[in-house]
Amino acid sequence: MSFSPVIETRLNVWTLAAVLTALYGLFGIARGWWHASLGKRRRLIRAYRRIAPFVRHDYVTEQFGEPAWQHKRTVRKYAAPIEGIEPDEPLEDVELTVRTWPLGLLGYLVTWCNDDDEVLMYSLTTRSRLFRPRVSIGPHRITLGKTALAALPSPNAEDSGPWFELGARRFSYAEEHYFGNPGGYLRWAVGMSDAGSPLTPPVGCNGDAWAAEDVAAFRHAARTNSVLVIGPTIDTEGVLPRGIAPDLDTVRLLELRHPIRVALSSACYSARTAVERRKDRKRKVREGPLA
């Protein structure tokens, strides 16, 4: 007579269901983290590489969604796009539409469009260590937030900068690079913006004067955090250096941190304030009789 053990299948089924549910939940958490961090970074870099001068604004919105800010800006533009711009080429004032996208906590994208909503210029700025995009500057390749300015040729040609500003709380630095046909007759302005990261103010500049050795030392120390791709018709005079990135006084007003992070920061600030007030009261009580 053979003995057949009795197996309780209901417990196994419910255990398997619980394990599968837990795995599905963990997968959802991992997927959300990926799309919010490393996956988002790769998606933004791919989208940036898909845009170029003269693409439509609607095409950019398909890649990045709707912009957060939009305003008008008057710049100088050459009468017609030509391969080699002569010094006496006529200029005209045109009004461009400037749109800015906050890329979460990673950085900013800015486009400059004409009346036909063609992108004539666009810039990318990094503000996080998690966002280090690899971008092309003509025949050169740099990594925003990591590559030093000295990795590119010195801006010693006429009308190629550098442009710099250093105020009480704001600063910018930009230099222009042009490579002719290998660069598609485009120009690139690379440099440092106070809206990006890392931050290296051009300390030592005085108005429009800055010694060549100081510029060279700054280019070796500073890491590029912004790049502006310029179409062949735009005159950069009046655009640089601030136009290399979004206006910090505008973008800093938008709270991009997660609500939980904001709540924790507020709670920590309130706790520190309460501790400091308590210490002040105790100090005043101790010093009161002596006064």
Image (cartoon, helix red, strand yellow):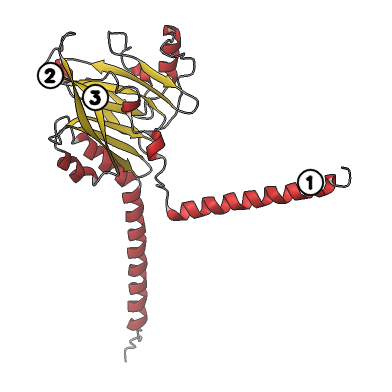
Residue carrying label 3: 75
Secondary structure at badge 2 equals loop
Residue highlighted by disc 1: 283
Frontmost of labels 1 and 3 is 3
Which residue sits at x=41%, y=40%?
Answer: 252
SS at circle 1: helix
* CA distance for labels 1 and 2: 71 Å
Q: Residue 228: x, y in percent?
A: 27, 27
Q: Nearer the viewer, residue 118 or 13?
A: 118
Q: Mark 1 or mark 3: which comes first in sequence?
A: 3
Quadrant of residue 59 within the rendered picture = top left
Residue 212 at x, y = what percent? 41, 7
Q: Are marks 1 and 2 in contact (CB under 8 Å)?
A: no
Residue 14 vertical placement versus 249 (above, below): below
Q: Say which mark, if any, is on residue 79.
A: 2
| Residue 32 percent coordinates (x, y) | 33, 55
Residue at 30 percent across and 45 percent down: it is 40
Q: Which numbered dot is residue 13?
A: none
